[in-house]
Image (cartoon, rainbow, N blue to C red):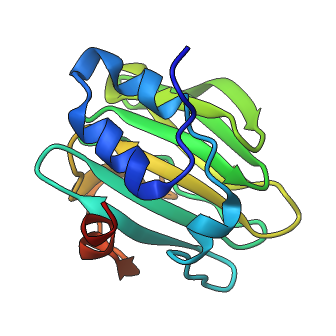
Amino acid sequence: MMKEINTIPNLIQQFEEAPDEELASVLKRINIPVDEFEEYASWSKNSYTRNCIARTDEFEFILICWDTDAKTAIHGHDGQDCWVHQVSGNIKERRYKNNEGDLSQYVARELDEGKMVYMTDKMGFHSIENISGQRAMTLHVYASPIDECKVVTEDGNIEIKALSYDTNHTPDWKEAV
């Protein structure tokens, strides 16, 4: 059995060195204490923040910090693989199929601490909501960085949204390895 990964720099290094077919197995070995993620955290009242821990041409690690009841719009992932690891708290993920402009939910699941889900545009769109009753954190890992994605607006239209970070710690992890 492969050894657990218990630091963020080690996780990123293992992910960077793994062949594509082993990326998910690297992420399944995460056993990083919550307090190690807290140094990358920033918070926004009634919303969520996107905190970049690491970014290269091949991948991106983003810590999303969820205030109580924060949620995303229904969105895609610009064709990239996305893994979501629940760091703290609980979230609810809802998945939607796009049938010629008509979105229909086909999955709703809760994600507890230490659990992981995978998403890609081939599976449809999804939304995430903090259902913890307190702040929560999730680690989002993309097989390639995402600078924009499709977002479903409140009136049901789909538009392209540019993505940005609330904080960017990219050099920090390189110095720790």
Q: Position of residue 73 (x, y in %)?
A: 52, 55
Q: 79 or 9, which is in the foreground? A: 9
Q: Number of numbered discs present?
A: 0
Let me know if residue 79 appears in the view: no
- Residue 67 visible in the picture: yes
- Considering only vertical position in the picture, is 26 above or below 163? above
Measured along the vertical axis of the image, is residue 163 above or below residue 112?
A: below
Q: Nearer the viewer, residue 132 or 58?
A: 58
**Quarter location, residue 3:** top right
Counting from the top left corner in percent of width and height, residue 65 is at 60, 68
> How far across and down, in percent of the image, does residue 137 sit?
64, 61
Looking at the image, which residue is at 63% across and 42% down? 31
- Image quarter (top left, top right, bottom left or bottom right) of the C terminus: bottom left
118 relative to 23 in the view: left or right:
right
Residue sitting at x 59%, y 54%: 138
Residue at screen point 53% across, 63% down: 64
Where residue 63 sits: x, y (%)? Answer: 49, 62
Q: Is 3 on the left-hand or right-hand side of 81?
A: right
Instruction: Name the residue at 68% across, 34% down.
Output: 115
Kindly give the residue lying farthest to the right in the view shown: 133
Q: Quadrant of residue 47?
A: bottom right
Residue lying furthest left: 57
Tell me the quadrant of the picture where the N terminus can be found.
top right
Q: For the view shown, which residue lies furthest in the bottom direction?
A: 45
Using the image, determine if residue 8 lies above or below residue 4: below
